[in-house]
Image (cartoon, rainbow, N blue to C red):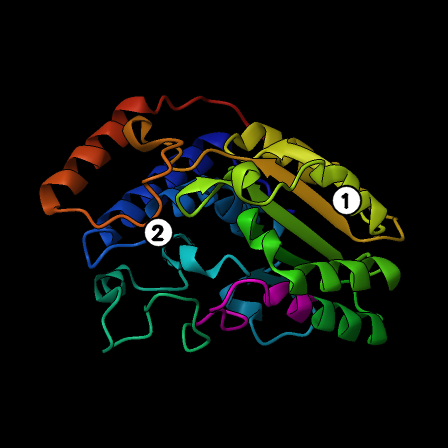
Amino acid sequence: MKNISLDVLKKSSLKVRERVIKMATKGGCFLGASLSCADLILYLYKVFLNIKLENLNSLDRDYFFLSKGHVVSVLYSVFVEIGFLDEKRLENHLSTNDYIYWQPNTNIKGVEFHSGSLGHLMSVACGVAEDIKLRKGKNKVVVLLGDGELNEGSNWEAILYAGSRKLNNIIAIIDRNKLQANTETEKLIKLEPLNNKFRAFGWEVRKTDGNNFEKIHSTFSLLPKKIFKPIVVIADTVRGYGVPSIEAKVDKWFVHLTEEESEKLIKELYRKTKTEKVHL
């Protein structure tokens, strides 16, 4: 786990969110859903995961799978922040002349696996975790899922498998913003009590505030080192977090902005933020 100041994380988070908002003007993107998990993905790469340009081909590095693939705009924005991707390439978002298109693509350095139809990458993560076990490795396998994505039955097959096989090198993170497309998750197909469901499938459960770096760090730094089951972190988040006018709005899922609207949201983003001088 890397040592980094909260001040640096918050400044990076602003840059990541600004890039995502700008990408919403290039044909649109899943803006609200991306902003809800921006802090989580940034924290993973900046602090928690042993993934860097120098070890991408190493068997000893960690693995991150973005199962919630439609929020690829935030993943690529984080990649810019950590030096994996040239920021100018973000201008090709949704252009068929580049691979910066709709979903994570393995032609982009740092992307582990393609995603598309939701619900697949938990199973992929299980396969990688099994391989690590066979090699007696110590790598972490982290997979981020949307809460609405949990309606896919393939997820629960993989969750059952991981619990049964005691894959204690897997950490699943649920982006629990409680909104799914243009409705509330609990109005469509109820997920609660989500923590009890995971426990029943043989998982260790933790909860955190996924939009608060202090609480994210507190949760991840205290994850048990010696445990014989997979871990899930249920992260309570807010769709559109960081931009008050679109926070928790069911209609701010996929958003296509004009240049003027984009600039307005970016100004709002920076007005809200107050940087604190606190260290993790």
**Quarter-wise, where is residue 36 in the image?**
top left
- Identify the residue position indicated by label 2 in the image: 30
Q: In this view, does 178 lie to the left or right of 233?
A: left
Q: In this view, does 198 lie to the left or right of 77?
A: right
- Identify the residue position indicated by label 1 in the image: 197
| Few, some or many residues within 10 Å of mark 1 (<14, 14–19, 20+) | some
**Quarter-wise, where is residue 265 in the image?**
top left
Mark closest to the chain's N terminus, 2 or 1: 2
| Location of residue 22 with respect to 252 vertically, above or below | below
Task: Give the residue displayed 60% in from the left and 66% down from the top.
Answer: 121
Asked if residue 223 can be seen in this view, the reply is: no
- 249 and 234: which is toward the camera: 249
**What is the x, y in percent for residue 53?**
49, 67
Report if residue 118 lies within the magenta region: yes
Label 2 vs label 1, nearer the camera: 1
**What is the x, y in percent for residue 134?**
84, 76
| Location of residue 189 with respect to 79 vertically, above or below | above
The range drawn in magenta is 109-125
